[in-house]
Image (cartoon, rainbow, N blue to C red):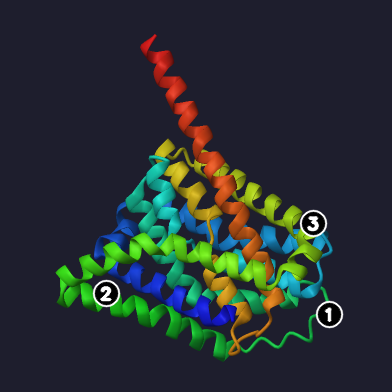
């Protein structure tokens, strides 16, 4: 049942991304190469490595180990743009990072996941990674709807704006619906593994926030840019991870999707707390300057 819901939701999210995509997003690579490089390094390198180490040292079962690495290998979630706006970050950079990471992970995710299976040191021979089918599903569920969104935006901008207004309002509720259905459908399995998963997931999110913030400070990036990178690295596309784990074309394993759903629950809570803390800090600094 879950896969029949997650696949259309993921397709709609990618279509919405195509409707929002602009050539200026790619120009951001030339205009702001350092913030983009720092963000992509945290997103595509640091997070997956941390996830693999965590899953290994927390002694997660093979299926959950792969599930945790899978969510870390996914691109940034579309909600990150909204969170960045609330946090008074660099929204243009956020959109650019989401776009670039989404396109990049269409190809890096299958290869890195295959590498993770080899490097894990665990006997995961029962997981046959259908590399061709995984790439094909990524192209159908991500590249195709993004392209359609771009084409509609190019040929009929008014229609694209109208559709985008509707989709932007239902995107986040759709993810909540997906999480709720998955939680109810696999309640017993989630309860059975929640203790081990919750610890790994919380550490992973906190590590993502800490390392991305440290990298941004190391390269002396502005506060707004640092907040943006933290949110982008910490907020993953859980819908994609669930789609890949539960899809009959790829793993067809709902248990593997559990780390993604637990990650989705915790990432929203933790990042909202993060935004609240930095906004309080900003308000206190303004009050101190006025005093």
Could you say which is closer to the camera, residue 212 or residue 269?
A: 269
Is 128 situated left or right of 178 in this image? right
Q: Quadrant of the N terminus?
A: bottom right
Q: Residue furthest top?
A: 291
x then y, percent, for residue 152: 22, 77
Decide: is 28 above or below 220: below
Decide: is 142 above or below 165: below
Determine the residue positioned at 66% across, 73% down: 185
Residue 34 in sight from this viewpoint: no
Q: Earlier in the sequence, mark 2 or mark 1?
A: 1
Q: Residue 195: which disc?
A: 3
Mark 2–mark 1 Cα distance, whole angstroms, equals: 43 Å
Could you say which is closer to the camera, residue 283 or residue 109?
A: 283
Mark 1–mark 3 Cα distance, whole angstroms, equals: 23 Å
Determine the residue positioned at 43% across, 36% down: 223
x then y, percent, for residue 74: 55, 68
Is 208 situated left or right of 104 in this image? right
Q: Residues within 10 Å of mark 1 (few under 14, many from 20)?
A: few
x then y, percent, for residue 150: 26, 74
- Camera-side mark, 2 or 3: 3
Q: Earlier in the sequence, mark 2 or mark 3?
A: 2
Could you say which is closer to the camera, residue 163 or residue 270?
A: 163
Residue position for label 2: 150
Is disc 1 placed on a helix, strand or loop?
Answer: loop
- Camera-side mark, 1 or 3: 3
Decide: is 217 above or below 54: above
CB-based contact (under 8 Å), mark 2 and mark 3:
no
Residue position for label 1: 123
x then y, percent, for residue 256: 69, 74
Name which quarter of the figure residue 26 lies in.
Answer: bottom left
Name which quarter of the figure residue 25 lies in.
Answer: bottom left
């Amino acid at each position: 049942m879950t896969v029949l819901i997650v696949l259309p939701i993921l397709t709609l999210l990618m279509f919405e991304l195509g409707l929002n995509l602009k050539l200026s997003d790619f120009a951001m690579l030339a205009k702001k190469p350092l913030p983009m490089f720092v963000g992509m390094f945290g997103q595509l390198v640091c997070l997956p490595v941390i996830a693999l180490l965590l899953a290994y040292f927390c002694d997660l079962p093979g299926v959950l180990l792969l599930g945790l690495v899978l969510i870390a290998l996914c691109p940034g979630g579309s909600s990150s743009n909204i969170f960045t706006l609330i946090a008074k970050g660099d929204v243009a950079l956020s959109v650019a990072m989401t776009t670039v990471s989404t396109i990049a992970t269409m190809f890096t995710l299958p290869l890195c996941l295959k590498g993770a299976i080899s490097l894990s040191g665990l006997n995961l021979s029962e997981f046959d990674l259908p590399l061709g089918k995984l790439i094909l599903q990524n192209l159908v569920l991500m590249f195709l709807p993004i392209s359609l969104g771009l084409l509609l935006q190019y040929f009929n901008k008014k229609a694209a704006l109208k559709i985008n207004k509707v989709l932007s309002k239902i995107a986040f509720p759709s993810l909540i619906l997906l999480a709720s259905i998955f939680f109810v459908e696999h309640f017993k399995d989630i309860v059975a593994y929640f203790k081990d998963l919750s610890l790994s997931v919380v550490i992973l999110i906190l590590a993502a926030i800490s390392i991305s913030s440290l990298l941004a400070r190391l390269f002396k990036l502005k506060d707004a840019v640092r907040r943006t990178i933290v949110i982008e690295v910490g907020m993953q596309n859980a819908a994609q991870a669930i789609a890949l784990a539960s899809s009959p074309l790829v793993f067809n394993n709902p248990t593997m999707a559990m780390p993604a759903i637990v990650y989705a629950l915790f990432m929203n809570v933790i990042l909202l707390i993060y935004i609240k803390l930095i906004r309080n800090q900003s308000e206190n600094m303004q009050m101190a300057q006025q005093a």
